[in-house]
Image (cartoon, helix red, strand yellow):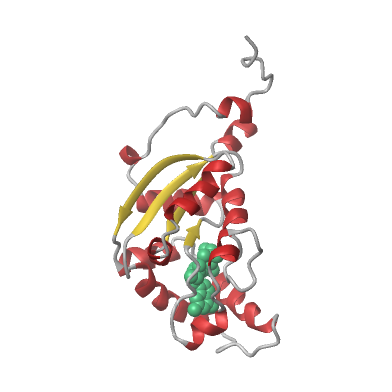
Amino acid sequence: MENLQAKHERSLVLIKPDGIQRSLIGEIIQRFERIGLKLVAVKMLITTEDHVEKHYTLDSNWRITNGEKSIKGYVDKGLEPPTRDPMEMSGRTLNCLKKYITSGPVIAMIWTGAHAVKIVRKITGGTEPLTSDVGTIRGDFVLDSYQLSDNDGRSIRNLIHASGSAEEAEMEIKHWFSETEIIKYNLVQEKILYDVNLDGIKE
Ligand code: GDP
Ligand code: MG
């Protein structure tokens, strides 16, 4: 039963406006597709500031964890953060995010498969492109930092949103998609990824 659930884990991914403007739609989708995840919903839309604020505050802890992470991003580099108050830090970030995410079309997607949330985060890379790993989307395709974006009073431009946990994903999926937009289908490769006996290959 546990295995069955893990195989059907879902993650919400947004290609943010900069990802579309940088002509990275295909590159980003390819990275999730080739690892074996299944795309079960996709749409392009222009969203509202209200929708963005709700998206980031679905998780009541986001304000505090985001603020602490940003402050740590400075401290780890021996830099002084703009404020030491996590709530103030994330309040600024949220305001910037409303402008950023509504600045142009975004692509919203649901990817499903084993460990979908962690796999998507691994491929996406850490929040700050300056320190996200080489080989990840944020590490390979963009060069922004906390310092640069905060000094300019804007969001870190990091191409993608990806759910942080399975619970967050389920809330975000309801926030962006209706049930009728989510397609149930089999993908041929699931036979190879998940079949226990691999007994359907040989003639
Ligand atoms: P994510 O889950 O890796 O996307 O990171 P968070 O959920 O903590 O933050 C959401 C988004 O806000 C990030 O992807 C960045 O675009 C932006 N952001 C987060 N922290 C900061 C910050 O300290 N400064 C600025 N300028 N932008 C930030
Ligand atoms: Mg997040």
Tell me if residue 147 comes above or below residue 144 in the rendering.
Answer: below
What residue is shown at x 37% (from left), y 46% (from top)? Answer: 42
Q: Quadrant of residue 183?
A: top left
User: Is residue 6 positioned above or below 176 on the image?
Assistant: above
Q: Which corner quadrant holds the N terminus? A: top right
The location of residue 107, given as percent across then percent down, is 37, 55
Percent position (x, y) of residue 197?
69, 19
Residue visible at 36% across and 52% down?
A: 176
Q: Nearer the viewer, residue 159 or 86?
A: 159
**Image point 62% across, 9% down: which residue?**
203
| Vertical placement of residue 143 versus 38, above or below | below
Question: Horizontally, is 143 left or right of 199 in the view?
Answer: left
Q: Is residue 97 left or right of residue 70?
A: left
Expressed as whole percent of the image width and height from the top left, the position of residue 78 reads 70, 87
From where the camera sits, is residue 1 visible?
Answer: no
The answer to whether residue 144 is seen in the rendering is yes
Q: Is residue 111 left or right of residue 35?
A: left
Asked where in the image residue 75 lies, by quadrant, the reply is bottom right
The residue sitting at the front extreme is 23
What x and y, as percent, mark residue 31?
54, 49
